[in-house]
Amino acid sequence: MWNSPKVGILGGGQLGRMLVESANRLNIQANVLDVENAPAKQISFHDGHVTGSFKDPEAVRKLAKSCDVITAEIEHVDTYALEEVASEVRVEPSWQAIRTIQNKFNQKEHLRKYGIPMADHRELVKGTADELANIGEELGYPLMLKSKTMAYDGRGNFRVNSKADIPEALEALKDRPLYAEKWAYFKMELAVMVVKTKDEVLSYPTVETVQEDSICKLVYAPARNVSNKINEEAQALARKAVSAFEGKGAFGVEMFLLEDNSLMLCEIASRIHNSGHYTIEGCALSQFDAHIRAVTDLPIPAKSLEIRTPSIMLNIIGGATPDSHLKAAEAALSIPNASIHLYSKGAAKPGRKMGHVTVTAATMFEAETLIQPLIDVVDKMRA
Ligand code: ATP
Ligand code: MG
Ligand code: MG
């Protein structure tokens, strides 16, 4: 029997909560650093949690004292505090990986050295309209202006259609460190969950993601109408990109599939990821199970990462009213094969991820048919 290690988790939102669900089943104590009553703490009763912020060095030090290994459900953490505690506790993935990845521009500069294909991009050094206009001349329009840091769910991106949009774009992202990306004309967005263990880099199959307003809405696992060759190539690219970073755990890799069937990296997350939620029902080991095992050096049979049954995941996002997510969940109760996950975040705000539903079936067509009425419900509730 393994020597039940204590795992510290920076962040107790829905990803932390689902990590705790996995840890619980292995009798592994997960100590969560976040506000009192965060979603992850609500399902884990012991006195090892720490109240505070994952951006506060003192709180990170306190968590470090209480566990054997520290990990994070979010990349926007204080990596200087992680660097400091790395001498007394294992930090997985490494603080270096999290620090590089949390800055999208640095992430891409790092990956460039490893020959990872991605959209051409330019740093804004001064952040002025003239500078962006010059970059626009070089990259062409439309282009995506992006915040280097603190970006999630598209909050941090602004599509610049022409030179005339520049003032509005700079105003929308003011006071943030910026870079610009050439527009990627993709026919589909793909994602792969990669799991780095002490001696291997494993991957789940390639899935298709659909974003609406830059927020992930649907995930089809496996990706529909994608050849085996592309499925394999996307996994290989994802593993290669993640291999450029030190440390163990699950990493989410987002990619663009272009018209000519070539692949481009969109971004990497140094953590479990929305595009991997389907693994809870779709695979023998979920991304959360795999992450817990990876950071505690427990075995992960590669076969357990295969998709057992076609799966579709639909996010339940805060809509027009504070309870619209509950109405969506209620509608899901009557859908055959639908597994409902509510995150217990309280009242919804528009655009906030409140839960998700995964429908599995013998074929993708059947799963599509089963979930369509729920997609219709969710579409009607949009803010
Ligand atoms: P996440 O919630 O996944 O962390 P994010 O806020 O970090 O999102 P990105 O993943 O960079 O943002 O972009 C969000 C979405 O915007 C992408 O999934 C894609 O649909 C679109 N997008 C991003 N970059 C480009 C690009 N260069 N060209 C075209 N579309 C893009
Ligand atoms: Mg991101
Ligand atoms: Mg993204």
Image: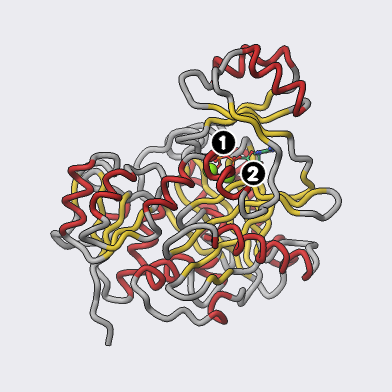
Residue lying at 23% horizontally and 80% vertically, measured from the top left: 3
Q: Which residue occupies the foreground of this view, 219 or 115? A: 115
Residue lying at 51% horizontally and 51% vertically, measured from the top left: 269
Residue at numbered disc 2: 211
Q: Position of residue 220 (x, y in %)?
A: 66, 59
The answer to whether any part of residue 57 appears in the image is yes
Label 1 lies in ligand 1 vicinity (Cβ under 8 Å): yes
Task: Report whether 138 appears left or right of 288.
Answer: right
Q: Position of residue 320 (x, y in %)?
A: 52, 32
Task: Report whether 131 appears left or right of 34.
Answer: right
Tag 1–tag 2 contact (CB < 8 Å): yes
Q: Is the image coloured rainbow, by chain, by secondary structure, or in one colour?
A: secondary structure
Q: Which mark is residue 154?
A: 1
Q: Which residue occupies the foreground of this view, 326 or 260? A: 260
Give the residue at the far right of this rendering: 260
Q: Position of residue 42 (x, y in %)?
A: 26, 55
Amino acid of disc 1:
Gly
**Mark 1 vs mark 2: in front:** 1
Q: Quadrant of ligand 1?
A: top right
Q: Which quadrant of the structure image shows residue 154?
A: top right
Q: Which residue occupies the foreground of this view, 318 or 83? A: 83
Near mark 2 (Cα within 10 A), the count class, few <14, some 14-19 or many ≥20, is: few
Task: Report whether 269 appears left or right of 223.
Answer: left
On-image quarter of the C terminus? top right
Label 2 lies in ligand 1 vicinity (Cβ under 8 Å): yes
As helix, strand or loop, the secondary structure at mark 2 comes to strand
Q: In the figure, 138 relative to 303: above or below?
A: above
